[in-house]
Amino acid sequence: MMPIASWHEAEAAYFDPDAFRLKSQLAIQTLRSITFILQNQKRRIPGFDEWYGTKDRDGLWQKRLRDIPLMPWLVKARNKIEKRGDLEAESFVRAEIIASHLDEGPRVEVPARLFEGPEVLLRRIPAGAITEHVRACGTLKIERRWVESDLPELELLDALVTAYGHLSGLHR
């Protein structure tokens, strides 16, 4: 599977926590396999050890990748998935009803929990919140953000697409 295809599958599953966990971890494993495949083909690439590196000595590419903080995280994340199981991903969910483009317009916060889908959130809207104006003009806005405990500063899909960008530049 191509790394970008697994990223798109994770994106499509963003609001399905079990599927998102599975697809995002598959994307991590697939991204990490790029360097494994490359290393396996090193006999076919003249000057590979100097350009890429060896177990004992970093080459230009290994040094470049190690200097990008996200890339060692990718290696650790893949190892955690392979050897210990799931990553420690957390999701933050926020849902609100917006019924006006004005900041002072009707707005209702809807309580949300990690594994709930949009249908559950719709049922949780307080009875008095649905006025005729809300029915006619309202929108349910649901925001979700996934982060991994060892990389809390980046949203997980952003981290994966950035890592893909770095690896896609892997050339001589």
Image: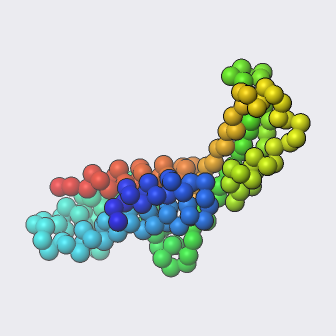
Return the x and y of residue 133 as percentages of the image width and height.
78, 26
User: Visible in this render: residue 15?
Assistant: yes
Please give left or right for residue 111 compared with residue 39 in the image: right
Residue nearest the viewer, comparing 35 with 6: 6
User: Visible in this render: residue 69?
Assistant: no
Please give left or right for residue 149 compared with residue 65 in the image: right
Q: Quadrant of the C terminus?
A: bottom left
What's the residue at 60%, 65% (across, down)?
A: 18
Return the x and y of residue 84 as percentages of the image width and height.
55, 78
Number of residue marks: 0
Residue nearest the viewer, comparing 55 with 125: 125
What's the residue at 19%, 68% (across, down)?
A: 49
What's the residue at 32%, 56% (across, down)?
A: 167
What's the residue at 35%, 66% (across, down)?
A: 1
Residue 128 to residue 32: above or below:
above
Q: Residue furthest right?
A: 128
Please give left or right for residue 94 compared with residue 53 in the image: right
Return the x and y of residue 126 as percentages of the image width and height.
86, 42
Return the x and y of residue 3 as percentages of the image width and height.
37, 60
Please give left or right for residue 97 compared with residue 31 in the image: right
Quarter holding residue 65: bottom left
Residue nearest the viewer, comparing 151 with 57: 151
Q: Residue furthest left?
A: 46
Residue 163 to residue 86: above or below:
above
Q: How is the protein colored in the picture?
A: rainbow
